[in-house]
Amino acid sequence: MPFLVLTHGGFLDLQKKAVLPGTSIHINPGIVSAEEIAVLKKDGIDVHLLPRSVDPQAEADIKETIRLIAEQSSEPVWLETRPVEISTQAKPAPTKTAIHSTAAERKRFHEQLLEGASQAFFQLRKLRSSGKQLLVIPYLGYGNAHQIRIRGRVLEDEGLNPLAQDASKWENLIGLYRRLESDQVPGARVMIRFQDIEREAATDSGGYFSAEFHLPRPLDSAGWHTVEIALLDPPPKDGSAVGSTGSVLIPPASARFGVISDIDDTVLWTNVTNKLNMMLMLARSNAHTRKPFKGVAAFYRALHEGPSGDECNPFFYVSSSPWHLFEPLLDFLRMQEIPVGPLMLKEMGLRKMFGPDRHHSHKLKQVEQIIRMYPQLQFILIGDSGEQDPEIYAEVVRRHPKAVRVIYIRNVNPDPSRVEAIDRLIEEVRPTGTQLIVVPDSEFAATHAAAEGLIRPVEVAAIRVDKKIDEMPDTATGETGL
């Protein structure tokens, strides 16, 4: 019989009851210690931390959580000390006993907490018999002549249609809700085909799959290549085929360098450090109405073209935004005529979004993977001073001192202590030959890039014009671009 425990008082009360080995307990995160969790597991109790905190006073959230738990067990769910029946069949209350406690290593508290939450997330969001059509969503992959990487996700179809330019704030909000609420399909199997090579992959607890291809023959062409993905299991109830077509970027031989850019508060304002404000911003706008920072689009186009004008230097975007926003972000890049490239976003789970050093470890790992894929290229790294971009990029230089040509950091934090910290990083990377440049805007960065031979000097004037256009009020909204 499963128990749902939302408060520490409820947990203490549960300790007075008979909890037999194999009992399933679903607990609000943060109300019990790692030591208590370890003791429960040692006694054979199946412990699950909820993927997010449920307010003990929020009746609708409680009922939804109970419903999800009940679907997995087909039994009544007990809410702390009182039973909450899902079926009409009454169940007796447990008899009384005690749970003993012992000490555990405190340093493992965070890891155990997040691991339990991840397991609970898998159980509570396991594919249900909803009868909905399934979707295979491929993300943009990347590679070289000898290997490629591709990633994607399997979801239940929530009607995720693109929003019109004149969509209301309410329609934006509904569209955002559908993306964040979309149900992933764990344990699904997909077949990924690239040219004449096939790889089978399975989705994890978040519905994500990934595959890497080592090619028997080098590719003889660059640009975007097609990858076909077909859903093998679970089979659609109507017997129809479910699949999709993805794209993988192979940079051309003409590329002189690559660009790895942050998105959040670098290309456009997202306020990613404040999740509530970020969601409010996304709910008020869409890919049509959201604007990049002034001059960013023109500057990125100039970097893509390079000093010769036809280099097709590849772009890669690493962001702390969740994968749920992949399509809106991709639409934004296309509509603003910003060079499209693979996006490396984050899984929106407790371990991925709220774990220790979450931003640092995610971005550092993705940047290093890109650099290793293209040892023949140097890279330009672009970010902002709001989060940890300067520290992350400096660490990249420490590990790969010859791989980074220039680091551009958009200054968004005037705090003197932050300025001093970045000044120290500038001096630290200088001996490697890498320049770390703090810039107020894209025009300043473009002037430096032209002097370094990274873009054509004539582009600086064009970027200045684009910057002024971006500063003009939008005729439809009356607002200025960010």
Image: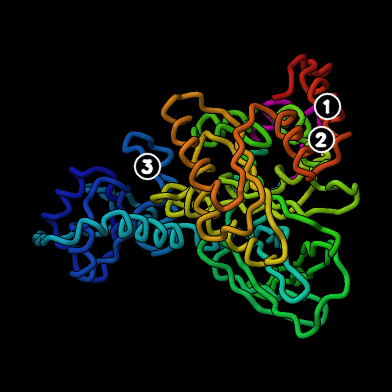
The verdict on residue 165 being magenta is yes
Quarter assignment of residue 26: bottom left
- Residue 248 visible to an observer of this rendering: yes
Are there few (<14), some (14-19), or many (20+) residues within 10 Å of tag 3?
some
> Callout 2: helix, strand or loop?
helix
Disc 1 marks a residue whose amino acid type is: Asp
The verdict on residue 227 being magenta is no
Q: Position of residue 349 (x, y in %)?
A: 48, 52
- Residue at figure coordinates x 68%, y 36% from the top left: 267
Instruction: Give the label on residue 466, or none.
Output: 1
Q: Earlier in the sequence, mark 1 or mark 2?
A: 2
Quarter assignment of residue 104: bottom left
Q: Position of residue 296 (x, y in %)?
A: 74, 34
The Cα–Cα distance between marks 1 and 2, rounded to whole angstroms, is: 7 Å
Task: Check contact, mark 1 vs mark 2: CB within 8 A.
Answer: yes
**Mark 2 = which residue?**
298
Q: Nearer the viewer, mark 3 or mark 2?
A: 2
**Mark 3 = which residue?**
54
Q: Position of residue 188 (x, y in %)?
A: 60, 70
Nearer to me, 80 or 467: 467
Colour basis: rainbow
> Callout 1: helix, strand or loop?
helix
The magenta region covers 161-174
- Residue at figure coordinates x 66%, y 62% from the top left: 152
